[in-house]
Every structure is written in C-alpha cells, then in structure tokens.
Amino acid sequence: MNSELNVDQSTLVNAWQERLPTILKPGDRAEVAPDQGDPNAIRIHIDAAGRQEYSFDFQCTYVDSREVKVDLVDVERDGATTDERNENIQGMVGDYTRHIHECAQTLQQITHH
C-alpha cells in the first residue's frame, strides 16, 4: 500500500538538516535544500571529512511516505568534478546512500501519517 507524502518540502528540509548530521561520520558536513523541480525531493550536499576534499551531491526523492530513491548527482574533489567510478569513491557513495536511507527511516514519524 503506497501512501503519498503529506509533508511540505520546507518541513522535510528542516527535519533532514537536523537529523542527517547525527547519522553521518564525525567531520562530515551536510547541507539539505529543497529540490526546485520536484516537491517530493530534496537535494543533499555532503562534504566528506578528511584531506581529500571530496563532496557529494545527491537527489533524494520520496517514492511514497516510507520509501526514498537516492541518486548520485555529482562528485567533486577540490571543487572539480571527478570520476565517480573510482573504487574509493564508490565505497563512499555506498556509505552515504545507506546513511540517507537510514535518515529517511528515522524521519518516518514525520513523513508517514
């Protein structure tokens, strides 16, 4: 049974901005913004901890009130787009995707009425 998302985007963005940093590794920084093209989606920018200066951009779209679809939009290193097929980057993308799904689950009290 699919149920539609009944939360406005700004409430969603605020909840994610509050919760996501508690799920990420210490030192990682996250910024959450509304997706301008889709009211059921948010944009997540993560600056990875460490010297490599990686940053990741994800689109997180609510399929329904319980399930999110996470898409990698861009990976940058030192401000320049980099090849996301690199094994190390793939591992980081996998970790962040899991963290995003985990965050979505913790926010179900907001999204699932």
Image: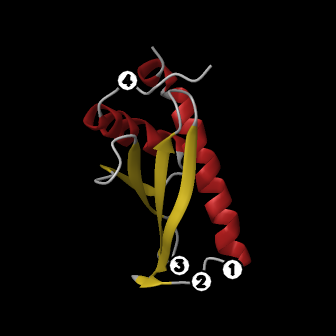
For the residues bearing labels 2 and 1, Cβ distance under 8 angstroms: yes
Q: Label 2, on which residue?
A: 83
Above or below 66: residue 81: below
Q: Which mark is residue 38?
A: none
Q: Is residue 104 left or right of residue 36?
A: right
Secondary structure, mark 1, is loop
Q: Nearer the viewer, residue 26 or 58?
A: 58
Closer mark to the observer between disc 1 and disc 4: 4
Secondary structure, mark 4, is loop
The span from disc 1 to disc 4 (Cα, nearest Å) is 38 Å
Please state which amino acid type lies under the numbered disc 2: Asp
For the residues bearing labels 4 and 3, Cβ distance under 8 angstroms: no
Q: Label 1, on which residue?
A: 86
Secondary structure, mark 2, is loop
For the residues bearing labels 3 and 2, Cβ distance under 8 angstroms: no
Closer mark to the observer between disc 3 and disc 1: 1
Estimate the x, y position of residue 113 in percent, counting from the top left.
45, 13
Closer mark to the observer between disc 4 and disc 2: 4
Q: Label 3, on which residue?
A: 52
N-terminal-most mark, 1 or 4: 4
Estimate the x, y position of residue 104 in percent, counting from the top left.
52, 35
Q: Quadrant of the N terminus?
A: top right
Q: Nearer the viewer, residue 78 or 51?
A: 78
Q: Is residue 98 left or right of residue 56?
A: right
N-terminal-most mark, 3 or 1: 3
Q: Label 4, on which residue?
A: 6
Q: Residue furthest top?
A: 113
The span from disc 4 to disc 3 (Cα, nearest Å) is 39 Å
N-terminal-most mark, 4 or 2: 4
For the residues bearing labels 4 and 2, Cβ distance under 8 angstroms: no
Crowdedness near tag 2: few (<14), some (14–19) or many (≥20) residues, C-alpha within 10 Å = few
The span from disc 4 to disc 2 (Cα, nearest Å) is 37 Å
